[in-house]
Amino acid sequence: MLSSQDLRRLEPNLREGLVGGLLVPEDSVLYPPCAARFLIKRAQNSGAELRLGCSVVKIGEGKFGWLTVP
């Protein structure tokens, strides 16, 4: 169990006035934009190409079909 002071110290971006919290060491939160950026960069470092404004219309036999979205 966390007091309001401990909660404020551990999670300073939470709103004011919370009375406490529960710390679960095995639990975590993932911020999707940061995770996506990390995975994109890692894929690019391995040779992947990032294509924006396209939709994948076919995947198979090691090839992709692209459709450019106007």
Image (tube, helix red, strand yellow):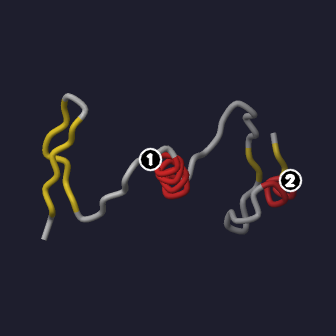
Q: Which mark is residue 47?
A: 1
Q: Few, some or many C-alpha atoms within 10 Å of disc 1 (few <14, some 14-19, many ≥20)?
A: few
In the picture, the quarter occupied by the N terminus is top right
Question: Residue at point 80% right, 60% down?
Answer: 8
Q: Is residue 56 above or below residue 14?
A: above
Question: Residue at point 36% right, 56% down?
Answer: 50
Q: Few, some or many C-alpha atoms within 10 Å of disc 2 (few <14, some 14-19, many ≥20)?
A: some
Residue 37 is left or right of residue 67, and the answer is right
Counting from the top left corner in percent of width and height, residue 34 is at 55, 56
- Snapshot quadrant of residue 11: bottom right
Q: SS of the residue at dot 1?
A: loop
Q: Earlier in the sequence, mark 2 or mark 1?
A: 2
Residue type at the position of mark 2: Asp
Label 2 – label 1 distance at C-alpha: 44 Å
Question: Residue at point 84% right, 50% down?
Answer: 3
Q: Mark 2 points at which residue?
A: 6
Counting from the top left corner in percent of width and height, residue 46 is at 49, 44
Residue type at the position of mark 1: Gly
Question: Residue at point 13% right, 46% down?
Answer: 57
In the picture, the quarter occupied by the C terminus is bottom left
